């Protein structure tokens, strides 16, 4: 990795000039570096210096663990890097290390996440605070290595907290926060940090990388509550659990999840204070006085912001709501943020086959949220499935969605509950 750094010199920046470093609110220093999303995640992992990383390479995640493995080889971390023969084994090794009391991280994509499926449930049910980056990629078939959200949406009910990232910077920031979220004593649940495969995982951008010690001070040390290695206080891990107690243990996971939003906000508040950020459950962009709004995850939200700015320049009151957290789903907060608009379009980069109108999972969550929390208000809402298998979505297509919304808001008919944007019919 040292040779890579020579080719990626961070432009040093300093408030008020000087030596080029940035002095944060509490005295920490940061650098701006040219990193793609995978490298940014690997950099966060280097700074966190987890006890164990077990991973199997799969496109487009490969670069993240490849870069991190170089950190291990160069002695920049003292992580035990476990190479395995599959993603199923990778998550199994993470569960074993987590049960022993280690701070554990991994990365995966697509079929790799699907191959972990059995063990991701075990990680959550054992309340192991594993952190995993997912570079989102389509699920077969046909075989496709490019971005959509079908992999992480397929894992949305596995019992993991899910954070989505718009950019390499957000992927870096979310990885750091994920450690604190997962290990919070009120939660103790694994966390997935998503970014869009190839779109941000391989797109080089300017990333503000915080001082190593500032990151380590933020994540702190992990003191496990239990360990399978504690022979003085033996416990049972991973037992058979039939109808006598299985139901109660699932109920306990639900109880843990009930603390998740508060924990995420608590961690974000400290992160924002230390590093001058503004993270929460979601990001509202020019939404306060918007007539129409899009809801979009990850990198598409960045493109939509450009469109919003252009439409605002034309006098169109367009807005955007970008969920950062998908699990737990912030239903009340989303409805409150959108309750004043006249029409909403939800952008889904995956399909829930056989669901209502074959809509996407984000739309289904939003529709349920408005039904339960909308106090009888009925905001017209439509779904746009787009970008499957990595198909590009550009500003002109997003602008066409806003034009549809303006017609709907003006009293027009809702032509289709679900539209497949950019597909050849």
Image: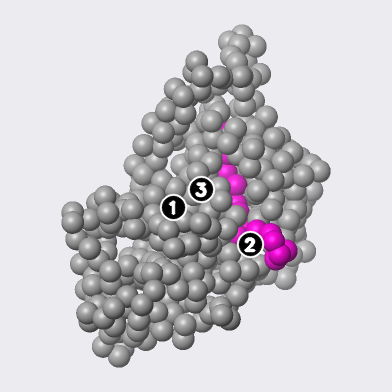
* Residue in view at x 66 percent, y 56 percent: 110
* Residue in view at x 72 percent, y 71 percent: 7
Q: Is 15 drawn above or below residue 394 in the view shown? A: above
Q: Position of residue 292 (x, y in %)?
A: 28, 75
Could you say whether the residue bearing mark 1 is in a helix, strand or loop? strand
Q: Position of residue 305 (x, y in %)?
A: 40, 76
Please report the bounds of the magenta region as a residue range: 128-145
Q: Quadrant of the N terminus?
A: bottom right
C-alpha gap between disc 3 and disc 2: 15 Å
Q: Are marks 1 and 3 in contact (CB under 8 Å)?
A: yes
332 relative position to 396: left or right: left
Q: Earlier in the sequence, mark 3 or mark 2?
A: 2
Q: Which mark is residue 156?
A: 3
Q: Is 105 drawn above or below residue 41 in the view shown? A: above
Residue on which the image places disc 1: 326
Q: Which mark is residue 138?
A: 2
Q: Is residue 320 magenta?
A: no
Q: Position of residue 100 (x, y in %)?
A: 64, 25
C-alpha gap between disc 1 and disc 3: 8 Å
* Residue in view at x 60 percent, y 39 percent: 120
| Colouring style | one colour
Q: Quadrant of residue 345?
A: bottom left
Closer to us: 78 or 256: 256
208 relative position to 95: left or right: left
Q: Main secondary structure of the magenta part?
A: loop
Could you say whether the residue bearing mark 2 is in a helix, strand or loop? loop
Q: Residues within 10 Å of mark 3 (few under 14, many from 20)?
A: some
State which mark lies toward you, 1 or 3.
3
């Amino acid at each position: 990795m040292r040779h890579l750094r020579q080719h990626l010199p961070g432009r040093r920046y300093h408030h008020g000039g000087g030596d080029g470093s940035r002095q944060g609110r509490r005295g920490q220093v940061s650098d701006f570096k040219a990193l793609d999303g995978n490298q940014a995640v690997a950099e966060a992992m280097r700074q966190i210096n987890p006890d164990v990383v077990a991973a199997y390479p799969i496109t487009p995640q490969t670069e993240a663990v490849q870069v991190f493995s170089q950190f291990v080889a160069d002695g920049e971390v003292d992580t035990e890097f476990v190479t395995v023969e599959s993603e199923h084994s990778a998550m199994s090794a993470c569960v074993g290390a987590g049960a022993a009391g280690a701070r554990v991280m991994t990365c995966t994509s697509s079929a790799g996440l699907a191959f972990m499926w059995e063990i991701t449930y075990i990680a959550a049910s054992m309340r192991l605070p594993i952190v995993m980056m997912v570079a989102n990629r389509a699920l077969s078939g046909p075989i496709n290595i490019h971005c959509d959200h079908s992999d992480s949406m397929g894992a949305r009910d596995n019992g993991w907290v899910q954070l989505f990232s718009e950019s390499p910077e957000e992927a870096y920031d979310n990885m750091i926060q994920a450690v604190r979220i997962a290990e919070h004593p009120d939660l103790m649940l694994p966390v997935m940090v998503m970014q869009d495969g190839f779109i941000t995982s391989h797109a080089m951008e300017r990333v503000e990388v915080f001082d190593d010690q500032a990151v380590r001070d933020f994540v702190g040390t992990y003191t496990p509550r239990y360990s399978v290695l504690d022979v003085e206080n033996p416990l049972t891990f991973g037992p058979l659990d039939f109808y006598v107690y299985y139901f109660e243990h699932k109920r306990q996971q639900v109880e843990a999840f009930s603390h998740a939003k508060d924990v995420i906000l608590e961690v974000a508040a400290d992160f924002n204070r230390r590093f001058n950020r503004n993270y929460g459950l979601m990001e509202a962009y020019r939404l306060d006085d918007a007539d129409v709004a899009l809801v979009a995850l990850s990198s598409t939200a960045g493109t939509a912001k450009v469109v919003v700015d252009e439409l605002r320049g034309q006098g169109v009151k367009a807005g955007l709501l970008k969920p950062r957290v998908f699990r737990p789903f912030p239903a009340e907060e989303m409805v409150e943020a959108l309750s004043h608009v006249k029409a909403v379009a939800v952008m889904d980069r995956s399909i829930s086959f056989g669901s209502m109108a074959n809509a996407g999972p984000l739309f289904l969550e939003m529709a349920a949220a408005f039904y339960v929390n909308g106090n009888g208000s009925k905001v017209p809402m439509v779904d746009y499935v787009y970008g499957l298998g990595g198909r590009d979505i550009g500003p002109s297509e997003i602008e066409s969605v806003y034009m549809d919304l303006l017609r709907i808001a003006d009293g027009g008919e809702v032509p289709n509950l679900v539209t497949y944007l950019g597909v050849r019919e």
